[in-house]
Amino acid sequence: MVPPQIMNISSDVTVNEGSSVTLLCLAIGRPEPTVTWRHLSVKDGQGFVSEDEYLEISDIKRDQSGEYECSALNDVAAPDVRKVKITVNYPPYISKAKNTGVSVGQKGILSCEASAVPMAEFQWFKEDTRLATGLDGVRIENRGHISTLTFFNVSEKDYGNYTCVATNKLGNTNASITLYGECRRPGRGAWRGGGVAGTREGGGRTLLGLCPSIGLNPPPSMQTHLYLILLAHGPGAVIDGVNSASRALACLWLSGTLFAHFFIKF
């Protein structure tokens, strides 16, 4: 009776996604030990792979990376266990990129998250211009799989679409992220997008204001027209920040009016 002993096992290996991998685990003992391979995964616990000295994986996927455990058992003594690590390289894909709204003069942060092996390198662009830390008051920080573009004092010219590019030796990918404006009510929260920002006359705030930063900025004649529409329909048509029904009605009416205006114009 001889306890099991693993005499030869494959070394750690790195492959590209889609490749084939063969692992070897040779063991001796009497009686002859049974060799079992398991994939040790943090998410799934222990997953059975095969009961053989050879482990063959064809067209390997990224979720098949990690540690594989070879166990030799013959019931004479405790099993002999060894591990092999498989690293699967794959091109980047951006898993998180969220548009962000910020008021003029405030700090704004755009974030881009990418998964890749090897780890991706990031670049930021606005239109065809590559951005760099210190250029036009922005800072780029890359920490692991996340890259951030920070604006310390947002101005009108900062609004627009930005492109995050993630690259490694297997390829690259990109995502478009928008920095848009918010209209703020004094002492309250923000109106997002291009909605009407106003209150009743006598409230100490602007009766009508539009967010020009998102590209919805009608000409003066159109703004005057909208102002008169709100006055004509009384206080209920003016957003007061409290009455959700009047806010919804005003936004609906404003959207329809703008659509009709630009449809006739173009």
Image (cartoon, grey):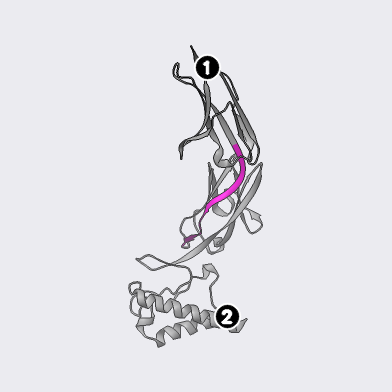
At 53% across and 15% down in the image, what residue appears? 29
At 58% across and 49% down in the image, what residue appears? 93
Please name whichever residue, 187 or 215, is drawn nearer the observer in this view of the structure: 215
Question: Of helix, strand and loop, which one carries label 1?
Answer: strand
Magenta stretch encompasses residue 101 = yes
At 65% across and 36% down in the image, what residue appears? 20
| Within-10-Å neighbours for mark 2: few <14, some 14–19, many 20+ | few
Q: CA distance from mark 2 to mark 1?
A: 80 Å
Q: Amino acid at mark 1?
A: Gln
Q: Which residue is mark 1?
A: 5
Magenta stretch, residue numbers = 88-102
> Eyeballing the image, is 190 above or below 220?
above
Q: Amino acid at mark 2?
A: Phe
Percent coordinates x, y for residue 250 in the rendering:
42, 78
- 24 left or right of 69? right
> Eyeballing the image, is 141 above or below 24?
below
Residue 207 in sight: no
Please name whichever residue, 198 or 43, is drawn nearer the observer in this view of the structure: 43
Residue 262 is labelled as: 2
| Within-10-Å neighbours for mark 1: few <14, some 14–19, many 20+ | some
> Eyeballing the image, is 46 above or below 72?
below
Percent coordinates x, y for residue 241 in the rendering:
35, 72
Q: Residue furthest toward the bottom?
A: 232
Q: Main secondary structure of the magenta part?
A: strand
Instruction: Give the mark toward the camera: 2 or 1.
Output: 1
- 81 left or right of 135? left
Percent coordinates x, y for residue 14 in the rendering:
62, 33
